[in-house]
Amino acid sequence: SQQGEEDPQALSIQEGENATMNCSYKTSINNLQWYRQNSGRGLVHLILIRSNEREKHSGRLRVTLDTSKKSSSLLITASRAADTASYFCATDGRAAGNKLTFGGGTRVLVKP
Amino acid sequence: DAGVTQSPTHLIKTRGQQVTLRCSPKSGHDTVSWYQQALGQGPQFIFQYYEEEERQRGNFPDRFSGHQFPNYSSELNVNALLLGDSALYLCASSRKPGTPKPYEQYFGPGTRLTVT
């Protein structure tokens, strides 16, 4: 079963707009990571945030983590057509070694 | 520095057959994890190998088995294939627990398995 739920399931925006997606999880975590997947191919690691961090930036990406609400958000600013992909959050739990538990993903379409 | 490689890229099998998928981890990594991703879903953890042993296992039946070789590469075997086994199978490599940054997992391109 999936640990996380992602919201929305799908998102359609114009190039240049910001895209925000959310992830909720159920159990205590060590880290939360965001991955991108293009057209059913392999997963590309985007950013990792530790359980003791609240916000992290990487280029046009901004991730927040609220452990009290067991939720995270990923913001992609100034989106480009190349950002069209599925985005997944994944957690590794304190009792689960480094096994990753994924959410169902958000499918993002950026229209040129 | 080669990343994670998987073979084959695509595979078509018939119900009841057996399949073997292969994965070579990224240089410097000794742990391989396998995930199954059904269409439109997030990946689900199958199992993890390091030191040539299965260390963790997800909620998958015994038809799913694996192996890790001394060079850290790994195989995933699925017996008695069902239609529901059709999915993208992803391999991820990392360092074993207790070493620096074991949570950094690098994924291969996947093997698309179709069962007819």
Image (cartoon, coloured by chain):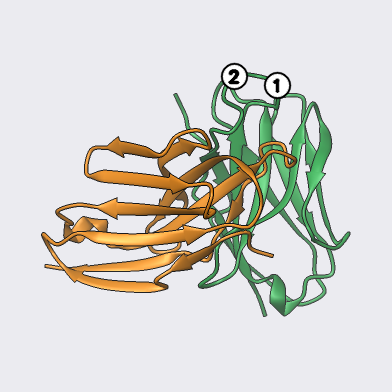
Label 1: few (<14), some (14–19) or many (≥20) C-alpha neighbours in 10 Å: few
> Label 1 to label 2, Cα distance in Å?
7 Å
Farthest residue in the front direction?
A68
Q: In which quadrant will I find the N terminus of chain A?
A: bottom right
Q: In which quadrant will I find the C terminus of chain A?
A: bottom left
Residue B14 vs B113, above or below: the answer is below
Q: Do callouts 1 and 2 point to residues on the same chain?
A: yes
Mark 1 — on which chain does it sit? B
Residue toward you, A81 or B108: A81
Residue B94 vs A63, above or below: the answer is above
Q: Secondary structure at mark 1?
A: loop
Q: Is A105 left or right of B61, judged from the image as shown?
A: left
Residue toward you, B26 or A94: A94
Residue B52 vs A27, above or below: the answer is above
Which disc, if any, is residue B75? none
Q: Amino acid at mark 1?
A: Gly
Q: Secondary structure at mark 2?
A: loop
Across and down, in percent, residue B16 comes to 82, 74
Q: Is A6 left or right of B96, judged from the image as shown?
A: left
Label 2: few (<14), some (14–19) or many (≥20) C-alpha neighbours in 10 Å: few
* Chain with green colouring: B
Q: Residue at x 18, y 61 (%)?
A: A81
Quickly name the residue at label 1: B98
Quickly name the residue at label 2: B100
Q: Are marks 1 and 2 in contact (CB under 8 Å)?
A: no
Q: Quadrant of residue A11?
A: bottom left
Across and down, in percent, residue A60 comes to 22, 44
Apparent colour of chain A: orange
Q: Amino acid at mark 2?
A: Pro
Residue toward you, A27 or B5: A27
Across and down, in percent, residue A88 comes to 46, 57
